[in-house]
């Protein structure tokens, strides 16, 4: 078994390498989005609410005076965060597995039509996963920013007007926003990969093989134009000899 590292000079191998790298960036930034909101009241006391992956804000409680609230009454953010991270982790493993297969099994991949078809099916499925997961997670990030904003929290405490609530620290959302960008970038990479994997399947090769003889026949039927005019029939005048 010989290793063929030249595959990384081809689009199919290079894209798999980029998929591996950007998948790590996507789920790593999504998991590293922990933050907190700190509100001061009565000029001396602080109320703090923390959140982290998987961002189950239903369990994040903040207490001001004698009142306590949950940052969210529903659990709609957690599933989108978990699905996004699942897609990122599995995409990382798949892209690594495909890259290893390209290097170590290049001859089998090109000669056995089953390998490219399996590669194509999995690539299409994870492309759908990326666009679905990134879209859902983008909405989840929007919900996190809305539920943990100072204005939204203070509106739920009627005692803040008398206690003099002020914001000490707001939540940070840079990592989870960047994770959404990486998510859509991964979708673009996997969508591009579909074409290059499709070119290795028998569907593309058989279609190309059928078009080549037709093109050759079309070219063979094209002849160079004659530089001489076509012969004309000679006509005899009435009464002429000959």
Image (cartoon, rainbow, N blue to C red):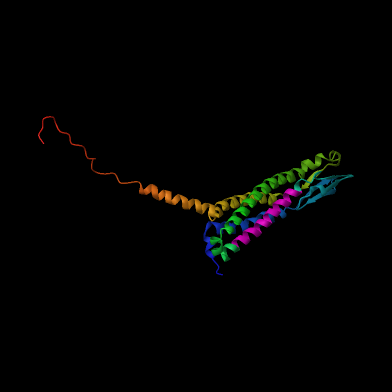
Task: Indicate the quadrant where residue 13 lies.
Answer: bottom right
For residue 144, side relative to residue 205 (left or right): right
* Residue 170 appears in the picture as rendered: no
Relative vertical location of residue 155 with respect to residue 104 in this rendering, above or below: above
Residues in magenta? 78-99
- What is the quadrant of the N terminus in the image? bottom right
Query: Does residue 204 appear anywhere in the picture?
Result: yes
Q: How many marks?
A: 0
Q: Residue at x 74, y 44 (%)?
A: 143
User: Residue at left 53%, top 54%?
Assistant: 202
Residue at the far top: name it. Answer: 238
User: Which residue appears farthest toward the right when viewing the image?
Assistant: 66
Query: Would you say the magenta stretch is mainly helix, strand or loop?
Result: helix
User: Is residue 96 on the magenta stretch?
Assistant: yes
The quarter holding residue 113 reads bottom right
Residue 210, percent from left and from top: 47, 51
Using the image as rendered, state which of residue 190 and residue 142 is in the foreground: 190
Q: Quadrant of residue 22?
A: bottom right
Q: Where's residue 60, x and y in %? A: 81, 49
Measuring from the top left, give residue 83's x and y in whole percent.
71, 51
The foreground one among 151 and 77 is 77
> Does residue 235 lie above or below 105 as drawn?
above
């Amino acid at each position: 078994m010989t290793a063929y590292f030249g595959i990384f000079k081809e689009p199919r191998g290079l894209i798999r390498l980029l998929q591996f790298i950007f998948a790590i960036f996507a789920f790593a930034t999504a998991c590293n989005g922990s933050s907190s909101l700190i509100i001061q009241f009565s000029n001396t006391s602080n109320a703090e609410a923390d959140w982290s992956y998987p961002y189950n804000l239903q369990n994040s409680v903040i207490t001001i005076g004698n009142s306590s609230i949950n940052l969210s009454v529903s659990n709609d953010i957690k599933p989108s965060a978990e699905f996004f991270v699942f897609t990122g982790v599995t995409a990382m493993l798949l892209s690594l597995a495909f890259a290893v297969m390209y290097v170590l099994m290049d001859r089998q991949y090109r000669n056995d039509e089953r390998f490219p078809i399996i590669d194509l099916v999995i690539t299409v499925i994870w492309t759908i996963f990326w666009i679905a997961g990134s879209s859902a997670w983008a909405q989840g990030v929007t919900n996190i920013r809305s539920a943990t904003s100072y204005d939204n929290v203070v509106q739920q405490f009627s005692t803040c007007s008398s206690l003099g609530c002020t914001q000490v620290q707001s939540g940070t959302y840079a990592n989870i926003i960047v994770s959404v960008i990486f998510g859509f970038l991964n979708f673009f990479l996997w969508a591009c990969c579909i074409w290059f994997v499709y070119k290795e399947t028998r569907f593309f090769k058989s279609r190309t093989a059928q078009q080549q003889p037709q093109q050759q026949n079309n070219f063979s039927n094209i002849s160079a134009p004659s530089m001489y005019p076509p012969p004309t029939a000679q006509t005899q005048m009435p009464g002429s000899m000959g």
